[in-house]
Image (cartoon, helix red, strand yellow):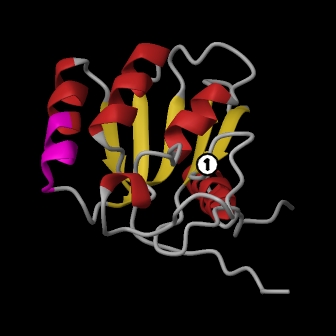
Amino acid sequence: MKRNNYIDWDTYFMGVALLSAKRSKDPSTQVGACIVNKNKKIVGIGYNGFPYGCDDNEFPWEKEGEYLNVKYPYVVHAETNAILNSTTSLENCTLYVSLFPCNECVKLIIQSGIKEIVFVDDKYIQTDSSLAGQRMLKAANIKVRKMSEFTIEVKEK
């Protein structure tokens, strides 16, 4: 007889996204993303960090200060990295992401052909960036679902 207490697909793929977030070196916000096709195959994974070739010891991780001295102009978001790391077409795929996407990521999500977003955290849901993203997602008929919160614990070395 088969085991009955296995995790469902949403939990599995969000777990992969949350585990990917653990790779981020951002001291304040770690975000992970996992893109899955209709056959339940992972086709892209990403986390927030600096672009290839940009030494993360040479660029700022600060959240506040002058624009060129904070992380925001330099960090590539998890959703963008997952799209760029994808191995195939993203048409009709589902994006699992730990944090609701900003408007810039939403544009890439729509353009890539992703048709569903599943997320856990919506702490910025009322910001202008998020509201603009929500507006575009609605216009593009992208399905959006929030999962109840959960975490994956990873022991530190």
Q: Residue at x 78, y 86 (%)?
A: 156
Rendered location of residue 36, percent (x, y): 62, 33
Total labels: the figure holds 1
Q: Is residue 131 magenta?
A: yes
Give yes or no for residue 154 being in the magenta stretch. Answer: no
Q: How far across and how far down the image is residue 92, in percent?
A: 50, 18
Q: Quadrant of residue 15?
A: bottom right
Q: Residue at x 54, y 75 (%)?
A: 27
Who's the residue at 52% across and 58% down the image?
A: 31
* Residue that carries the numbered disc 1 in the rendered image: 50
Seen in the image, is 155 located left or right of residue 14?
right
The correct choice, above or below, for 69 with respect to 134 in the image is: below
Where is the N terminus found, in terms of image quarters?
Answer: bottom right
Occupied quadrant, residue 53: top right
- Crowding near the residue tagged with mark 1, few <14, some 14–19, many ≥20 C-alpha atoms within 10 Å: many
The x and y percentages for residue 73 are 42, 45
Could you tell me which secondary element the residue under label 1 belongs to? loop
Give, as a single range, the part of the protein colored magenta.
126-132
Q: Main secondary structure of the magenta part?
A: helix
Q: Quadrant of the C terminus?
A: bottom right
Q: Position of residue 79 (x, y in %)?
A: 51, 40
Q: Quadrant of residue 57?
A: bottom right
Residue 61 horizontal side relative to residue 4, left or right: left
**Residue displayed at 37% across by 68% down:** 63
Q: Amino acid at mark 1?
A: Phe
- Compared with 64, 48 (above or below) is above
Which residue is nearer to you in this view: 15 or 85?
85
